[in-house]
Image (tube, rainbow, N blue to C red):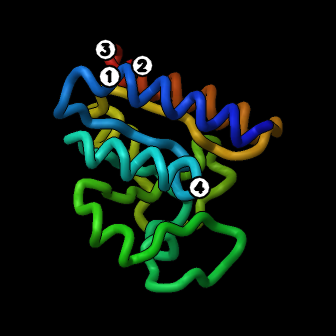
C-alpha cells in the first residue's frame, strides 16, 4: 500500500513538471528507491536534480557499504550526470555524518525551483527536520514550490 502511494505521488509530481523543462529540483532524502526512480525520471525529462543526503561519499560509492545510509551507486550517478549529491545535516542537526554539510541551505535551496521531502520514517526527529527544511527553503528561496 505504501509503495502504491509513493508511485502515485511520483506520477503526480512528474505530470506537473512534465510541462516545463529545466527546473532545478532538490530531493531531501532521495537516496532510497523512490528517490532513485524519481530522480532518474526527472533528469530524463530535462531537469537538474540535487539530492540532499546524510553522506554523499557513501551514497556514491561503487558498492553499498552500509545499510544505515541510502545508496545510489557510482554507476547510477554516471548514467544520470544531471543528478548531484549534497551532504546535509538531515535538517535537524542530529544526523550530521557527511564531511561537507555546512551551507547546504544557501548553495542548494537558493537555486531550487522545487523541493521534495523524501526523508524516511515519521519520528519527532524527522518532523523537526522537515520543519527546518521548509523554513530554510522559504528563507533562501521563497518562490520555490
Q: CA distance from mark 2 to mark 4?
A: 27 Å
Residue 111, position as x, y percentages in the image: 25, 34
Quarter of the figure with residue 18: top left
Residue 16 lies left or right of residue 124; in this view the side is left
Q: CA distance from mark 1 to mark 4?
A: 27 Å
Crowd class of label 1 (few under 14; some 14 to 19; many from 20; radius 10 Å):
some
Q: Which residue is mark 3?
A: 143
Please say whether residue 28 is visible from this viewpoint: yes
Residue 17, position as x, y percentages in the image: 32, 25
Is mark 2 in CB contact (under 8 Å) with mark 4? no
Crowd class of label 2 (few under 14; some 14 to 19; many from 20; radius 10 Å):
some
Q: Which residue is mark 4?
A: 33
Q: Which mark is residue 141?
A: 1
Of tags 3 and 4, the one toward the viewer is 4
Crowd class of label 4 (few under 14; some 14 to 19; many from 20; radius 10 Å):
some
**SS category of the residue bearing label 3:** loop
- Looking at the image, how many numbered discs can be counted on the residues? 4
Q: CA distance from mark 3 to mark 1?
A: 6 Å
Q: Which residue is mark 2?
A: 138
**SS category of the residue bearing label 4:** helix
Residue 120, position as x, y percentages in the image: 70, 46
Residue 56 lies left or right of residue 94; in this view the side is left
Q: Nearer the viewer, residue 140 or 28?
A: 28
Quarter holding the N terminus is top right
First in sequence, mark 3 or 4: give its number. 4
Amino acid at each position: 500500500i505504501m509503495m502504491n502511494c509513493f508511485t502515485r505521488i511520483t506520477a503526480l509530481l512528474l505530470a506537473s513538471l512534465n510541462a516545463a523543462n529545466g527546473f532545478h529540483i532538490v530531493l531531501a532524502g532521495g537516496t532510497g528507491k523512490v528517490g532513485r526512480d524519481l530522480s532518474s525520471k526527472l533528469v530524463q525529462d530535462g531537469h537538474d536534480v540535487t539530492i540532499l543526503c546524510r553522506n554523499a561519499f557513501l551514497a556514491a560509492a561503487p558498492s553499498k557499504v552500509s545499510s544505515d545510509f541510502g545508496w545510489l551507486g557510482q554507476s547510477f550517478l554516471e548514467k544520470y550526470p544531471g543528478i548531484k549529491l549534497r551532504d546535509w545535516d538531515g535538517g535537524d542537526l542530529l544526523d550530521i555524518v557527511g564531511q561537507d554539510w555546512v551551507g547546504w541551505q544557501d548553495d542548494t535551496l537558493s537555486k531550487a525551483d522545487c523541493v521534495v521531502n523524501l526523508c524516511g520514517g515519521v519520528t519527532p526527529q524527522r518532523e523537526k527536520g522537515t520543519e527546518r527544511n521548509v523554513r530554510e527553503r522559504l528563507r533562501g528561496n521563497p518562490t520555490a514550490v
